[in-house]
Image (spheres, helix red, strand yellow):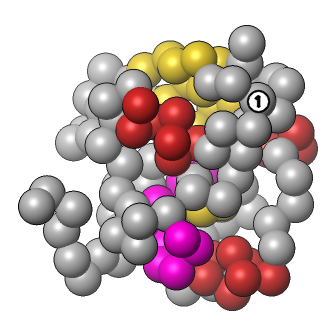
Amino acid sequence: MPQIIFLPHEEICPEGAVVEAEPGTTICDAALASGIEIEHACEKSCACTTCHVYVREGFDTLAPSDEAEDDLLDKAWGLDPDSRLSCQARVANRDLVVEIPKYTINMVSEHH
């Protein structure tokens, strides 16, 4: 089973984490299932950029982003060539190394 290696993030996962994910699972769902509270203000409907991540290794194993995701990524803080919305990027059959950006653009809080 592929693994997602989350690099350390000061607030969300200070020690970093390694989680197993079934192929077809989104990066966001795998993170949340493992207790990594990645933001997802639009409830994973590809309507915001709060779940933006950098896929530092394994990017080429992901299916290409669609037009809706690309349009939103253009608005993400700190966009770079490895950027994806974690609610849209599905694990394939290889390990991924993911970095959660330091900042996000979020007008709401998920902690209800």
Asked if one can make out residue 76 in the rendered structure from this viewpoint, the answer is no
Which is nearer the eye, 89 or 25?
25
Task: Give the answer, above or below, for where 70 lies relative to 17.
Answer: below
The residue that appears at 80% across and 66% down in the rendered structure is 65
Q: Residues within 10 Å of mark 1 (few under 14, many from 20)?
A: some
Name the side, left or right, on which 47 lies relative to 42: right
Residue 73 in percent (x, y) is at 62, 76
Instruction: Work out which quarter of the rendered image holds the C terminus and state it.
Output: bottom left
| The quarter of the displayed image where residue 43 is located | bottom left
Asked if one can make out residue 21 in the rendered structure from this viewpoint, the answer is yes
The residue that appears at 75% across and 38% down in the rendered structure is 24
| The quarter of the displayed image where residue 57 is located | top right
Residue 100 in percent (x, y) is at 45, 48
* Residue type at tag 1: Pro
Residue 23 in percent (x, y) is at 76, 29
Is 9 covered by the magenta stretch? no
Is 49 covered by the magenta stretch? yes
- Secondary structure under the numbered disc 1 in the rendered image: loop
The residue under label 1 is: 23
Q: State the predominant SS element of the stretch in magenta.
A: loop
Name the side, left or right, on which 95 lies relative to 4: right
The residue that appears at 83% across and 46% down in the rendered structure is 62
Name the side, left or right, on which 14 lies relative to 72: left
Task: Give the answer, above or below, for where 36 lies relative to 1.
Answer: below
Region of the chain picked out in magenta, as a range: 45-54
Which is nearer the eye, 22 or 81?
22
